Amino acid sequence: MNKNLSLIATLVPLIIVAIGLVGWVLSLRSDVTATVGQLEAVQAEVEDAQFRLTELEKSLAIADDQMKNINAEHEIMGELFEELGETLPAGERRTYGGYN
């Protein structure tokens, strides 16, 4: 009987530690699963931000091209106004150009 009590006294703490270890592993798994879900959400947000940034870059390139075209047209208009300078009223003499 003494051996049985000794065996029980040895096994009970080991069983308690094993149960605690299983609980810890399960909670760790839950934490990892939650973290993976958050990471996937962040990756989706980053992909959305990348797409919006690419679209913004395209829009800015188009706006820059249009600005260059408008500035070139203004420069041509300025040259025409300089040629017609004598026939224009004083208020219509403007300086155009100097755009890069």
Image (cartoon, helix red, strand yellow):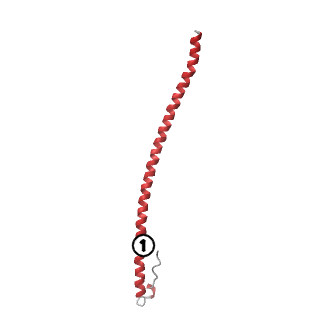
What is the quadrant of the N terminus in the image? top right
Quadrant position of residue 94: bottom left
Query: In the rendering, at what x and y percent does residue 56 appear?
Result: 43, 61
In the rendering, at what x and y percent does residue 85 appear? Answer: 42, 88
Q: Give the image location of residue 92, x and y in percent.
A: 43, 85
Q: Residue at x 45, y 51 (%)?
A: 46
Within 10 angstroms of label 1, few (less than 14), some, or many (20 or more) residues? some
Q: Residue furthest top?
A: 1
Identify the element where label 1 is drawn: helix
Q: Say whether residue 19 is left or right of residue 60.
A: right
Q: In the rendered image of this protein, does residue 52 appear above or below residue 72?
A: above
Residue lying at 45% horizontally and 46% vertically, measured from the top left: 41
Q: Give the quarter of the image for residue 15.
A: top right
Total labels drawn: 1
Quarter assignment of residue 91: bottom left
Q: Write down the residue under mark 1.
A: 68
**Residue 22 drawn at (x, y percent):** 51, 28
- Considering every residue shown, the one lying at the far bottom of the view is 86
**Residue beneath the point at 42% across and 65% down:** 61
